[in-house]
Image: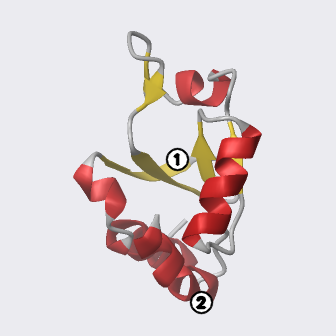
Amino acid sequence: MSRYRDNVGKFTEVNTAVLGVSVDSVWANKAFHDQMGVDFPILSDVKKEVSREYGILDEQSGTARRTSFVIDTEGIVRHIDQARDAMDPSGAIGACSMLKKPGGQ
């Protein structure tokens, strides 16, 4: 999360919103948000509906796999990073930059 926090300006440059989503409670996400000093929302998926819909919920453990999605203005998933790759925002930044270019979407 800290690498997304540190690179949020690069997302802003390509007219992209950054949202975090966690299966933790609203209160736990608020504490984490404040602790990390991020300036984008961290949404609570405590019912695990979003994580299940996106296919990233580990039903056995009840946790969501670390994943980042780039979703275009039409709601189409254009890029996915998972596991360690999801911790590095460069793939998502690159995908967002491509979407902004003519013919990129």
**In what quadrant of the picture does the C terminus appear?**
bottom right
* Residue 27 x/y as whole percent: 74, 43
Name the mark nearer the viewer: 2 or 1: 2
Amino acid of disc 1:
Val
Which residue is more in the foreground, 86 or 73?
86
Residue with the mark numbered 2: 13
Residue 17 figure quarter: bottom right
Circle 1: element type: strand
Relative to residue 30, is residue 48 depicted above or below?
above
* Residue 73 x/y as whole percent: 69, 59
Q: Residue at x 61, y 74 (%)?
A: 37
**Is 86 on the left or on the right of 93, as rendered?**
left
Relative to residue 39, is residue 20 depicted above or below?
above
**Is 18 on the left or on the right of 7, as rendered?**
right
* Residue 63 x/y as whole percent: 45, 26
Amino acid of disc 2:
Glu
Circle 2: element type: helix
- Lower position in the chain sequence, tag 2 or tag 1: 2
The dot on residue 77 is: 1
The colour mode here is secondary structure
